[in-house]
Image (cartoon, helix red, strand yellow):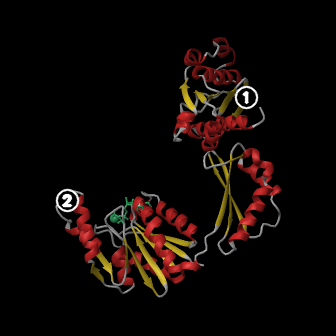
Amino acid sequence: MVRTVVVTVGDELLLGDTIDSNAARIGRALGELGAPVLRRETVGDEKAAIAGAVERALADGDLVVVTGGLGPTPDDLTREAVADLLGRPLRRDATVEEALRARYRSAGYKDLPETNLRQAMVPEGATVLPNERGTAPGLALEHEGSWVVLLQGVPRELEGMLAGPVRELVQRAFGDRLRAPLHRRLHTTGIAESKLAERVEALLPAHRGPVRLAYLPSLRGVDLRFTVGGETDPAEARAWLDRMESALTELEGYFYAGDDLVEALARTLDESGRTLAVAESCTGGLIAKRLTDRPGSSRWFLGGVVAYADRAKVDQLGVPPDVLARVGAVSEEVARAMADGARRAFGAFAGIGITGIAGPTGGTTEKPVGTVWYAVSVGDRVEAEKRVFMGDREAVRERSAQAALNLLYRTLRGPT
Ligand code: ATP
Ligand code: MG
């Protein structure tokens, strides 16, 4: 195994001005590579603090990844701190210097600003990791069989480094000591986390060998992530994951393929050459937005109406005014009429209608905040559902958009 320890540097991280998303990026990238992160520490822009953290990291890490503080300004101290700690004097590297000068000239500067020369300083014996997305290169130092890698704080630059030079370095340095875990992620929607957990725990075999299971809830559903650590033989790991997945076939009705329900829905529509139109009230265009976020959606998405006022529901979608007056805008009848109206207005095969109370105001005892009616009109069939969603305005809108998309997905796939 290769154990990685992460050190993130920056006063802004300690103060909470910046969320330490780099630690997450490193955790993901190195975990996938088979060098999982064991521990992480955050320190401020202070030389002694950085050196202390790197020293502690080296005590139990085979690989120490440091981000932040590689820039040209006086508060960027990582390079100096690590060079001192490991007893590697800093020298100006002619190749790095020339690359910096070229980069500045091509950006329209006359020459390299004096302060940026600090970025050409390389600790003795260090490997320079080219940074295609910025000025300062990354640095890697071998120390008593371990490696210390210094990386940029700017997230975009860090991502480029992790995907390219760091990956190559880690593979070169640790080779067959890397043990990548195997994951299988099942996406569910339309079932609450606790209910899902109850059913999953009842269906899975009691003995799960090396498999770990995590429930990952979001506003759009709950993902199940099965993991087998890299110490298990890959073929055996896959067999374990297959066993877990097949134990859950009974829950198939809640699963969807792909990372997003819209992806699954798009495939279903595309394959059958069918088209869709939407009529949205409480979601205010969110469903149309999600559909059109997908490249190629023009093949199957015809358009939508945001019908917020009663008047718009009548004029744009043909919702009968007497129905609106009798049962109110948030009702089964109106959701059905909206779905049907959207389908007819656009000449689509399928229509979605959605109407609800996103809150925080507007609720009544009969129709509390979170009450949403949504319907799908497919061919000559109209299906409607009501839910009372929890959460704030954003949560209600996000959850209800997902529920309406899911109803359509199930209706299109189910027996007609
Ligand atoms: P620069 O050359 O821009 O000075 P640097 O390597 O010195 O880069 P920092 O100065 O520490 O990096 O940070 C640069 C930017 O990246 C800052 O805007 C900071 O908010 C962001 N950043 C730094 N560390 C992190 C982190 N751990 N998570 C997310 N963003 C970060
Ligand atoms: Mg900086």
Q: Residues within 10 Å of mark 2 (few under 14, many from 20)?
A: few
In the image, what residue occupies the spot 40% across and 66% down?
Answer: 10
Visible residue check, residue 121: yes
In the image, what residue occupies the spot 63% across and 16% down?
Answer: 319
Q: Sequence-wise, which precedes: disc 1 or disc 2?
A: 2
Q: Which secondary structure, mark 2?
A: loop
In the image, what residue occupies the spot 66% across and 39% down?
Answer: 268
Q: Quadrant of the N terminus?
A: bottom right
Residue reaching furthest left?
110
At which x and y percent is residue 295? 51, 41
Q: How many marks?
A: 2
At which x and y percent is residue 400? 63, 36
Do the CB atoms of the residues marked 1 and 2 lie less than 8 Å apart? no
Q: Which secondary structure, mark 1?
A: strand
Residue reaching furthest top?
322
Q: Quadrant of the C terminus?
A: top right
Whether residue 343 sits left or right of residue 53 in the image: it is right
Q: Quadrant of ligand 1?
A: bottom left
Q: Residues within 10 Å of mark 1 (few under 14, many from 20)?
A: some
> Toward the viewer: 201 or 305?
305
Give the numbered dot on residue 383.
Answer: 1
Q: Quadrant of residue 98?
A: bottom left
**Which residue is under mark 2?**
109
Check the image and report above or below for 216 versus 381: below
At which x and y percent is residue 11? 39, 65
At which x and y percent is residue 266? 61, 39
Check the image and report above or below for 292 versus 79: above
**Amino acid type, mark 1:** Glu
**Amino acid type, mark 2:** Tyr
Q: Cα distance, mark 1 to mark 2?
A: 64 Å
Check the image and report above or below for 49 versus 207: below
